[in-house]
Amino acid sequence: MDEQHRIRLIGGQYEETALFRLFDEGDACRLLCEYRHKTIEHTASDFFQALCDIRSLLAENGLIPFCYGASLNVYPSGMARDMGQGLKAYKLAVGRHAKMSDLVEIFGSGPDVNPASVAAQEQFFSNWLASPRS
């Protein structure tokens, strides 16, 4: 896999972006992030987890990637993580089941991205799991 995505970073002093490069290494997913003349990388079992790990480091500088993978109400299913390397996730709404039409690319963006910390995103997912859904 030779894939890369330029993503806007919010929270900095000026308009800036980061370049995310994805490397499929068999059972491991390596994600490299280049920003502010720095490079950070993480390897995980899927790209969503690698993105979360990098987001935690970016947060130390007050930065959040403006993409669905960093949006409050977006989280991948276990199947998306196991079979799709965590590259797609569902836009979730408390009280509603996720549908195929709710699937988004984690490195994609749109007007409905709601940037959040990793902890806030995980809490939203926990709340969604605990909620009755119709």
Image: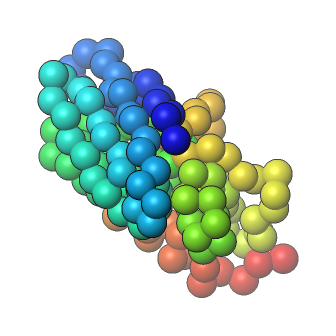
What residue is rendered at 57% in x and 51% in y? 87
The front one of 10 and 77 is 77
Image-based side of 109 in relation to 102, left or right: left
In this view of the protein, can residue 132 be seen by the observer?
A: yes
Image-based side of 3 in relation to 54, left or right: right
What residue is rendered at 55% in x and 58% in y? 86
Q: Residue furthest top?
A: 15
The front one of 68 and 47 is 47
Q: Is residue 70 above or below residue 52?
A: above
Q: Is residue 74 above or below residue 83?
A: above
Image-based side of 11 in relation to 91, left or right: left
The front one of 15 and 19 is 19
Q: Position of residue 15 (x, y in %)?
A: 32, 15
What residue is rendered at 73% in x and 72% in y? 95
Q: Position of residue 57 (x, y in %)?
A: 20, 49
Q: Is residue 108 above or below residue 104?
A: above
Q: Position of residue 65 (x, y in %)?
A: 39, 37
Q: Position of residue 36 (x, y in %)?
A: 18, 23
Residue 39 placement: quadrant: top left
- For the C terminus, the quadrant is bottom right
Q: Residue furthest front?
A: 26
Q: Is residue 28 above or below residue 116?
A: below
